[in-house]
Image (cartoon, rainbow, N blue to C red):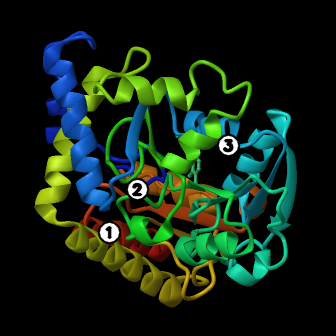
Amino acid sequence: MLYTVGPVHVAPDTLESMTKPMITHRSGEYKELHANIVEKIRKALDTDMDVFLVAGSATVFNEGAIRNAVNERCLGITNGSFGNRLIEIAELNGKAVDKVQVPWGKAMKPEDIAGKVGKDIEAVHWAANESSTGVFSDSVALSKAVSEQNPDALKIVDAVTAAFAMDMKVRDMDADAIIFGTQKDLGLPPGLAIMLCGERMLEKAKTVKNRGFYTDLLKIKKQSDTNYALTTPPVSLMYGLDYQLDKMLKEGMSNRYARHAEMAALIEDWADRRLAGVFPEEGYRSKALSVLNRGELDFDAFHKKLKAKGYEISNGYGEVKEKTFRIGHMGDVTPAGIRELLAAFDEILEE
Ligand SMILES: Cc1ncc(COP(=O)(O)O)c(C=O)c1O
């Protein structure tokens, strides 16, 4: 059983939902599937933004957002590996990037960007839930702080491990692009990138050169408006997505967010009692994944024993790789499952 940070455990019924006969992506059945997915994502996340779907991992839309939003200069706020990666993406695409580096384990806060969003900043990007540190920053507050300084600056939010696990308050966030993929809290295999896209982003894209083909949001929008994908979509995965969204809406988003919070609380309590606590600062701890301090734990030996019991968790990541490890509690995993996992942790520590 996977308690990893992604790809995550995929439930057997979900796997089964992906075994329907293939259809072509230019058929009426496909259009219906595409339209249903868009509508259900909007409902789950309470938004009327455009919902774009493209085959690929989430990074394709992180890159796409930057390529469509920025001619010259952007600002990257970062508190870990994935915020850093957005900066790297922008730089590799030839953009000049101003950087705000927040210490690992701390949340990015409005005061961190005070005075930094000048008129020449075309977009600001950050990771809502930093998967290397387990910090969930307040993207609503960050977005507000950006717009107060420069109302024209677009806001690009990597929500890869935030979406569907914690209430991001998409409406209040007022971002121009919010990006995620299937292999995290949607509880599906990898392979589909999803972007919530706002009108201002599309307007700006008209003025930006070198948007590419695959990542051209204007091309994607044109197809999306008729419930088609720009290029061949992963149809089987989309059957699974449609199925997972039904499951999610049936559970109810507030119940879902509460389930994730309960799992995070169980792990945090265990880490405080049995190990060296959790890494991220209080008040900003992710409910999708927990990053635990290793203390004296020999993680590799511990993980080997855990795998022998049938469980897999994730190593630390980036700068804090050697002093932390991570437990993913996304998608369909339950508090009961987390209790079992923690009981297995106890058994190993007692051995
Ligand atoms: C916050 C965050 N951003 C981006 C990514 C990269 O996503 P993908 O591998 O789907 O491109 C990850 C993957 O773990 C992530 O956690």
Residue nearer the viewer, 177 or 150: 150
Q: Residue at x 35, y 66 (%)?
A: 341
Q: Residue at x 60, y 75 (%)?
A: 144
Q: Please, is residue 302 above or below residue 200 in the view? A: below
Judging by the rendered image, the residue that carries numbered circle 2 is 3
Q: Please, is residue 153 above or below residue 283 in the view? A: above
Task: Tell me if I can see residue 332 in this picture.
Answer: no
Gap in angstroms between the C-alphas marked 2 and 3: 35 Å
For disc 2, does the CB lie below 8 Å from ligand 1? Answer: no
Quarter where residue 258 is shown: bottom left
Residue nearer the viewer, 101 or 293: 101
Left or right of 348? Residue 147 is right
Q: Nearer the viewer, mark 2 or mark 3?
A: 3
Judging by the rendered image, the residue that carries numbered circle 3 is 69
Dot 2 and dot 1 residues touching (CB under 8 Å): yes
Label 1 residue SS: helix
Judging by the rendered image, the residue that carries numbered circle 1 is 338
Quarter where residue 64 is shown: top right
Q: Residue at x 31, y 79 (%)?
A: 262
Residue 178 horizontal/vertical position (percent): 50, 52
Structural crowding at the residue carrying mark 2, measured as other residues with C-alpha within 10 Å and reported as few (<14), some (14–19) or many (≥20): many
Amino acid type of the residue tagged 2 in the rendering: Tyr
Gap in angstroms between the C-alphas marked 2 and 1: 9 Å
Left or right of 160? Residue 233 is left
Of callouts 3 and 1, which one flags the residue occurring earlier in the amino acid sequence?
Answer: 3
Amino acid type of the residue tagged 1 in the rendering: Ile
Q: Please, is residue 46 above or below residue 275 in the view? A: above
Task: Tell me if I can see residue 106 in this picture.
Answer: yes
Amino acid type of the residue tagged 3 in the rendering: Ala
Residue 156 horizontal/vertical position (percent): 61, 53
Residue 23 horizontal/vertical position (percent): 19, 12
